[in-house]
């Protein structure tokens, strides 16, 4: 039926010609019959036309009865509306611009939200992929799980096969052009095959790559690493590089657009999980069920639904809880449809409902404001056109046809604005991802390219805008009286604003005030956050991320290297003091259970292993006790500085100095040598009063991975411009790796 209507519409001119010939034939036949009765030709023609009832009316009736007549009428109304808008180009341009801005802005935001929530990472074949989300007491706890649990799910699951595993890792990669701190993953051998990622060069991993035979460690590198650090060498496959101090052979190059399966991944190198863990001495950590660091993404088996997979995985989780009650109590997994942030623990993933609510409210407000504005423009234009509309009705146009014509004019405006909005959203989708970077200065792996869903959203929004801003002029045209406007000379001057127009102005102003007030409050909130006293001096403080994994073999050697780097940076002109730590503010602090020997109830505290002068560099003066000493590692007992909140929680009303506490699952005995004021040392976290433990990195040496150098410099405006470029060469003077 639809095809028949379309064919009728496309053949309209031909059908009209056939209709004209048929009517002419019938008219001529009637004329000949009347002439045969004795009438003259002029009389016969006149009589024949009267008998047939009017050729134009018959043509309209026939056209109205054809398939697709309503669509034909819509096109006619659109052409009429386009001609009417051409007569008032100023109003048309203003209306199109306003609608394009509101539709384009909302479509762009929707495109970003849609890209984050539903789109897979580039190059990933996401059909039937699911992410296994860890849940504790039924609550989402991120995409990670322990490696032994991953092996159990691989062995026992029949509904999710294959199932990949990956562990985020920091790498120091040395190539001919130098050493680079990169992010990547230790992955199972089926990683790329499960994701459906086709490498640009070389091959993916095999099970043999985990056995560490004579070929040694292998790696797949990103297209970016190949082009920038390896200069696009044609013989890249088979080249040797050094990964965290271990020789490795490149066996594959990822496609240009692929940098990881998850939003936070953004990797540049992938190595076999088991092989690298053995080489780097991390194989023991793989047997620990307490550490949920393995992301799991799998593919639903053919014919298996999400609910069936959920039932099977719940049964496996129950068996693991019974087999390992100490580590797996209240722990389960749930399959969720794969996307870049599926099962994520990032701010975006956790606050999706809040973001969506804010986006919806802002979208509604902006649409209402703009539609009220455009409705006023169209209403004023309709007032000027009242005589024209009255003449149309007097010539036979119904009120429905007049309203339909006004709606068609609105559709012309909205469709033009829709096209402009889609082009704007496409431009923004290519521009914004290049501007957004992660905390490590790496461009995030984002795809905001509009698809048919985004275009459909924009179309729906444009149609809703059409309805909203054509209601007012349509109501006015419906209620219009013909006779006063048909009298010559009457209403030559347009009267003042109508009541409806004044109400639209009030609505527009009210929503504008609401939106501006909300915007002002949001801006003020950001200003207040920036002005919050964090508990330390954040001014003139430079954070330097450095990866030492490729330079040292042991934790002790790693701390010795950090001490040498610290001394070298202190010699740069303008630098006042330097220290180091395992984590930066708001940068992945480790949570530990802390208790005193007399109590079985632990207190959760955030832990950071820090170097000498750490508190001094942050501008913190202990309220009790002392700072961690320069040679804390030579002391016998392990020592720590805690914040006031933790001290009050462990020893309420008593001094914490000289007391001991038990730290972590191993119940390490640690002596408290200092108490600092409370502060937001790890950023704004979920806790209202977080507890902190600062351990000496010389007594508990930092692992061979990325650490943070804290550099306090003087406040002269030109100091940072000279210090920042000097840091890289200074570090390489100590160790080129």
Image (tube, helix red, strand yellow):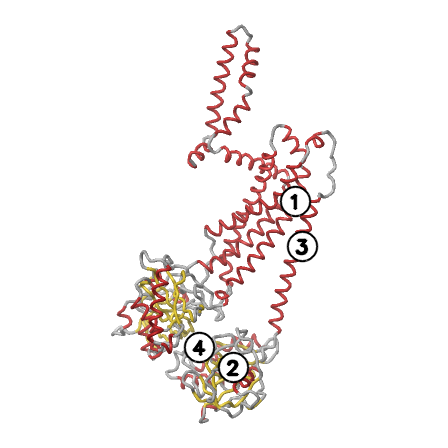
Q: What residue did someone put label 3 on?
A: 510
Q: Percent position (x, y) of residue 681?
A: 54, 78
Q: Nearer the viewer, mark 1 or mark 4?
A: 1
Crowding near the residue tagged with mark 3, few <14, some 14–19, many ≥20 C-alpha atoms within 10 Å: few
Q: Is residue 13 above or below residue 418?
A: above
Which is more N-terminal, label 4 or label 3? Answer: 3
The residue under label 1 is 377
Q: Earlier in the sequence, mark 1 or mark 4?
A: 1
How far apart are labels 2 and 4 at the CA level? Answer: 21 Å
Residue 706 circle label: 4
What separation in Å lies between label 1 and label 3 (alpha carbons)?
A: 18 Å
Marks 1/3 in contact by CB < 8 Å: the verdict is: no
Q: Earlier in the sequence, mark 2 or mark 1?
A: 1
Q: Nearer the viewer, mark 3 or mark 4?
A: 3
Left or right, 315 with reference to 411: left
Residues under labels 1 and 4: Cα distance?
60 Å
């Amino acid at each position: 039926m639809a095809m028949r209507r379309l064919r009728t519409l496309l053949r309209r001119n031909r059908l009209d010609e056939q209709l004209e010939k048929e009517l002419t034939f019938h008219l001529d036949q009637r004329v000949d019959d009347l002439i045969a009765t004795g009438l003259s030709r002029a009389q016969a023609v006149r009589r024949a036309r009267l008998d047939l009832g009017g050729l134009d009316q018959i043509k309209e009736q026939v056209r109205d009865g054809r398939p697709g007549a309503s669509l034909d009428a819509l096109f006619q109304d659109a052409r009429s509306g386009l001609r009417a808008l051409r007569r008032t180009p100023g109003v048309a341009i203003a209306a199109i611009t306003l609608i394009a801005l509101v539709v384009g802005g909302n479509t762009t935001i929707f495109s970003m939200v849609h890209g984050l929530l539903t789109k897979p990472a580039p190059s990933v074949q996401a059909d039937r992929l699911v992410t296994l989300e860890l849940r504790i007491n039924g609550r989402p706890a991120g995409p990670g799980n322990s490696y032994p649990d991953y092996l159990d799910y691989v062995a026992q699951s029949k509904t999710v096969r294959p199932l990949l595993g990956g562990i985020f890792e920091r790498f120091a990669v040395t190539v001919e052009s130098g050493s680079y701190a990169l992010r990547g993953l230790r992955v199972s051998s089926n990683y790329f095959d499960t994701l459906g990622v086709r490498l640009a060069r070389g091959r993916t991993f095999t099970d043999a790559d985990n056995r560490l035979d004579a070929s040694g460690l292998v790696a797949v590198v990103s297209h970016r690493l190949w082009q920038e650090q390896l200069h696009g060498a044609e013989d890249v496959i088979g080249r040797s590089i050094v990964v965290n101090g271990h020789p490795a052979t490149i066996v594959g190059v990822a496609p240009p657009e692929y940098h990881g399966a998850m939003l936070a991944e953004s990797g540049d190198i992938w190595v076999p999980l088991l092989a690298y863990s053995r080489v780097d001495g991390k194989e023991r950590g793989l047997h620990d069920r307490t550490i949920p660091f393995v992301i799991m993404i799998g593919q639903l088996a053919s014919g298996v639904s999400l609910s069936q997979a959920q039932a099977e995985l719940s049964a496996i989780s129950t068996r693991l809880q019974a087999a390992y009650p100490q580590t797996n109590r209240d722990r389960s997994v749930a399959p969720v449809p794969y996307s870049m942030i599926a099962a994520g623990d990032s701010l975006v993933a956790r606050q999706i409902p809040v973001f969506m609510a804010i986006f919806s409210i802002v979208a509604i407000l902006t649409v209402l404001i703009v539609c009220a504005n455009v409705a006023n423009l169209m209403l004023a234009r309709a007032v000027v056109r009242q005589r024209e509309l009255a003449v149309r009705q007097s010539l036979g146009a119904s009120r429905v046809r007049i309203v339909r014509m006004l709606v068609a004019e609105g559709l012309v405006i909205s469709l033009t604005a829709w096209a402009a909005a889609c082009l704007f959203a496409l431009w923004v989708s290519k521009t914004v991802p290049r501007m957004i970077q992660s905390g490590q200065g790496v461009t995030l792996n984002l795809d905001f390219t509009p698809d048919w869903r985004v275009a459909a959203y924009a179309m729906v929004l444009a149609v809703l805008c059409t309805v909203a801003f054509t209601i007012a002029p349509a109501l006015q045209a419906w209620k219009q009286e013909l006779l006063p406007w048909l009298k010559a000379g009457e209403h030559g001057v347009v009267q003042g604003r109508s009541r409806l127009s004044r109400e639209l102005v009030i609505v527009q102003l009210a929503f504008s005030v609401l939106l501006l007030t909300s915007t002002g409050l949001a801006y003020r909130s950001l200003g207040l956050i920036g002005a919050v006293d964090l508990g330390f001096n954040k001014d003139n403080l430079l954070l330097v991320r450095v990866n030492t994994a490729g330079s040292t073999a042991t934790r002790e050697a790693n701390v010795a290297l950090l001490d040498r780097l610290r001394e070298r940076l202190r010699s740069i002109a303008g630098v006042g003091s330097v220290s180091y730590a395992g984590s930066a503010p708001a940068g992945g602090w480790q949570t530990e259970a802390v208790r005193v020997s007399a109590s079985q109830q632990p207190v959760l505290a955030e832990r950071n292993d820090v170097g000498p002068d750490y508190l001094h560099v942050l501008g913190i003066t202990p309220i009790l006790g002392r700072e961690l000493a320069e040679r804390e590692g030579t002391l016998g007992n392990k020592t720590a500085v805690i914040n006031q909140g933790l001290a009050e929680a462990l020893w309420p009303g008593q001094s914490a100095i000289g007391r001991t506490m038990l730290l972590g699952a191993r119940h390490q005995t640690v002596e408290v040598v200092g108490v600092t004021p409370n502060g937001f040392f790890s950023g704004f976290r979920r806790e209202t009063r977080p507890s902190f433990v600062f351990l000496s990195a010389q007594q508990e040496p930092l692992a061979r991975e990325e650490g943070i150098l804290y550099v306090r410099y003087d406040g002269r405006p030109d100091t940072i411009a000279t210090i920042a470029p000097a840091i890289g060469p200074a570090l390489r003077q100590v160790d080129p790796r």
